[in-house]
Image (tube, rainbow, N blue to C red):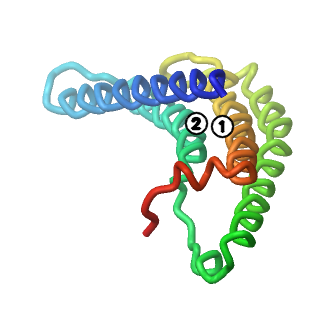
């Protein structure tokens, strides 16, 4: 679990860096509207930073079980059954994410020979964000299953709305 904690810290740091850079680029874009200088690259870079912010932050939300969910059905189940239904949900999400990794990589390869319009970044590097997203969603889904079935989930669980 030490490796998972290090990985989570890295993902959190990357999320903070991407989001901070996104805010800075948007501020440059806004101030550029009122200055004689034009910054045509800001729209494209802000889109790319937003994509990577989500790719790094979504697995953290999965790890901390902070996705929006409707738990009306889960709330009426007995505690033991609820644990297994939640584990099944994480299993479905994990398997689906793992299944999509190869397709996301194939999609990334389509951008190998394409470059972005203003920044000339290979689109492969932008599209690889989907691979990152699905790999870590699958990983954290399986970690959540382990935590649920070993009872670590109840110890960490706080107040739910």
The residue at the point 40 percent across, 28 percent down is 16
- The residue closer to the viewer here, 84 or 79, is 79
Quadrant where the N terminus lies? top right
Please name the residue shown 64% across and 75% down the image. 74
Quick check: 157 above or below 121?
below
Residue 122 lies, with reference to residue 29, above or below; the image says above
Q: Residues within 10 Å of mark 2 (few under 14, many from 20)?
A: many
Q: Secondary structure at mark 2?
A: helix
Which label number is shown at residue 36?
none
Q: Which residue is mark 1?
A: 133
Residue 158 % position (x, y): 45, 57
Q: Residue at x 58, y 17 (%)?
A: 121
**As drawn, is 63 to the left or to the right of 103?**
left
Mark 1 or mark 2: name the one nearer the start of the chain.
Answer: 2
**Gap in Å between the C-alphas at discs 1 and 2?**
5 Å
| Quadrant assignment for the C terminus | bottom left
Q: How many marks?
A: 2
**Residue 37 drawn at (x, y percent):** 21, 19
> Measured from the top left, where is residue 59 in percent x and y?
60, 40
Question: Closer to the camera, 14 or 39?
Answer: 14
Q: Decide if residue 90 is on the left or right side of residue 48.
A: right
Give the percent coordinates (x, y) of residue 23. 31, 31
Instruction: Pick whichever, 144 or 50, lies toward us.
Output: 144
- Residue 126, by quadrant, is top right
- Residue underneath mark 2: 55
Farthest residue toward the bottom? 76
The quadrant in which residue 73 appears is: bottom right
- Tell whether label 2 touches label 1 (CB within 8 Å): yes
On the rendered structure, is 47 left or right of 22? right
């Amino acid at each position: 679990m030490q490796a998972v904690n290090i990985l989570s810290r890295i993902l959190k740091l990357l999320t903070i860096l991407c989001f901070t850079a996104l805010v800075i680029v948007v501020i440059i874009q806004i101030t550029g509207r009122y200055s004689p200088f034009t910054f045509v690259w800001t729209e494209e870079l802000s889109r790319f930073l937003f994509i990577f912010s989500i790719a790094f932050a979504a697995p953290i939300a999965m790890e901390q079980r902070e996705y929006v969910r409707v738990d009306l059905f889960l709330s009426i189940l007995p505690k033991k059954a609820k644990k297994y239904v939640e584990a099944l949900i994480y299993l479905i999400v994990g398997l689906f994410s793992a299944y999509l990794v190869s397709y996301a990589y194939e999609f990334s390869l389509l951008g190998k020979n394409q470059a972005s319009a203003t920044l000339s970044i290979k689109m492969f590097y932008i599209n690889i964000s989907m691979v990152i997203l699905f790999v870590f969603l699958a990983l954290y889904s399986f970690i959540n299953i382990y935590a649920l079935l070993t009872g670590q989930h109840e110890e960490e669980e706080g107040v739910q709305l």
